[in-house]
Amino acid sequence: MGILEVKDVNKRFGGLQALGDVNLSVAENSCHAIIGPNGAGKSTLLNCLVGKLIPDTGSVMFDGQSVLGRKPYEINQMGISRVFQTPEIFGDLSVLENMMIPIFAKRDGAFRMHAVEDTANEKEIVEQAENMLESLSMGDKRHMHSASMSRGDKRRLEIGMCLAQEPRLLLLDEPTAGMARADTNNTIDLLKQIKDERDITIAIIEHDMHVVFSLAERITVLAQGTPLVEDTPDKIKGHPKVREAYLGETA
Amino acid sequence: MLGLNKKDTSLLILVAALALFAPFILNPFPAGSGMAQFNAGYPDLMQRFVIFGIFAIGFNILFGLTGYLSFGHAAFLGVGSYAAVWMFKLLSMNVVPAIILSVITAGLFALVIGYVSLRRSGIYFSILTLAFAQMTYALAYSVLTPITGGETGLQLALDDPRILDGAASSDNIPVPGLFGMEMRGSSQLELGDWVFTFSTGYYFSAIIMLLSFYLSIRIFRSPFGMMLRAIKSNQQRLNYTGLNARPYTLAAFVISGMYAGLAGGLMAAMDPLAGAERMFWTASGEVVLMSILGGVGTLIGPVLGAGLIKYMENILSKINSDILHGWFAFMPDGLEDIIVSMIYPFIGKGWHLTLGLMFMLVVIFLPGGLVEAGQRISRLFGRKKSEDKSDKSTSTEPAE
């Protein structure tokens, strides 16, 4: 039994079968990659996991509990954090404030009214946020306006914000899309570090094979909404079906 | 001090000082001089400055922090007024219960309207609030006449029960007061040619405005305020950070509705009648203009915006062509007529034109409103003054 169990999930948009009988099991504390050509249904699958979409049939279980029908914030509170394809951060807020919000969410849950207290007096939260930024080597940027940072830094902050909640499952949607090589390598290093230091399960959707093969322990190949193969990276590299469907001559 | 940091404390002290000395600051010209018409230091107008200041402060908590643009806030103002007048009629002419009831009633209204409207965001939210406000207006104007007084508005009458006050002894309708102090009471100070008026009602409203301002600073600096800014910034991220935006926005909506109700209650306390026109959509639009003109999302901006608009409404609109001719009398006749006819569209009944032009200029060149203007000016005068930015602009405007 994996921490995330996807069973017979189907999703149809009008005449398009986006997902057909998807079965997926992600083992606890592993790093599982989902790859596939454009339009394979990777993002649809991810959206079904976080509550943005509801599958037509099938079940999605996280740690023995169904996530279907729950709102994104409820699923997040269960322990699933998501990193978006384009970094989603609070652009109008400072870097430190960005980091404080998930820590508040972890401490106080989905809603709690602190309307007259002073934010600066929440010493514990400020301290935790600063430590987190330190560990991301972003301590010197804490008073920066977060929208003015580079894309790599925004990604770093976003991943850090997800980690601040200490999730059990971290979902990454093409975390290095549109990034310069140096930023991509930094992101890979950061993810490796996270994998080594924490008890965390990582599920990653990625186009960049370099990223996939440096991180993943297991890979599922999705094509036309259906899982084609699931295996270790080494086996995937040489798999004829995968070559045919996706990797082509580059593998 | 009071749990505020240094900058906020000095801002609060500045606003308090301006409010305290407003009768002097707003009366710079000697009575009877040609410039006396620009004096804004009479109780009626000063009360309007602070009351609309409260309205705008509350509106800014919703619009400035969460970015949800409500186009129906005047409904809460109107509801607050009706509640206060009913309290005067039924219970007592003391303003305290009246204002408490108006805040509570407006809060309940905001809870209902907000619960429905906040299911949508952006333009749909604005339209929903506008629709609710117009429905409230229409109801108050027609169907609910027994409660609201319909077209004539809700007024006090001699035979109102006023349970706590007992039967009225005289033949006059009693006036609202605070434990014996009449709201319309005032005293005058004559210094040479200057006449300064100190009104009980104004100072009562000013103290409430200061309390509201203080509370809004606390909300801005609180974790709750940070969450509201996060909602404005990126709701997607907020949802995927395990936070439910809906109760936060609803709380902000109710708080700002209560501010509007407080303003409405104070209006009734100053002048005990309430009419449906207070809820008309132009009144809701006005508070949007105030916030944007002063500086959305800043602490003092909405107060400045409210002051500026009310000043223009009351002072600019009183200038007529005779006065203009008086000013330009030194010119040759032909030239005088030309100048007067050029300026005339912008004054008197045309003051909306001036307001519109100013609004355009502010939105295009100063998106941060008057507060941004103040910041730019203070930057211009060297770094020394950059500490007390956002204060500079107050000196030229009737701040509250």
Image (cartoon, grey):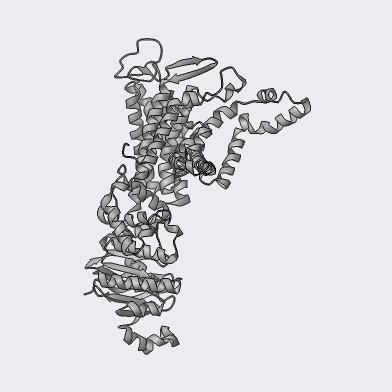
Quadrant containing the N terminus of chain A is bottom left
Q: How many marks?
A: 0
Q: Is residue B147 visible?
A: no
Q: Residue furthest top?
A: B170
Give the residue at x 34% y 73%: A189
Q: Is residue A196 above or below residue A96?
A: below
Residue B18 coordinates in the image, percent (x, y): 45, 30
Quadrant containing the C terminus of chain A is bottom left
Residue B142 coordinates in the image, percent (x, y): 46, 32
Q: Is residue A164 visible?
A: yes
Q: Is residue A250 left or right of residue A76?
A: right
Q: Nearer the viewer, residue B56 or B164?
A: B56
Residue A143 coordinates in the image, percent (x, y): 39, 54
Q: Is residue A229 above or below residue A89?
A: below
Q: Nearer the viewer, residue A152 or A115?
A: A152
Quadrant location of residue A246?
Answer: bottom left
Residue A243 coordinates in the image, percent (x, y): 40, 87
Quadrant location of residue B89?
Answer: top left
Q: Nearer the viewer, residue A73 or A113?
A: A113
Give the residue at x 32% y 70%: A57
Q: Nearer the viewer, residue A230 or B84?
A: A230
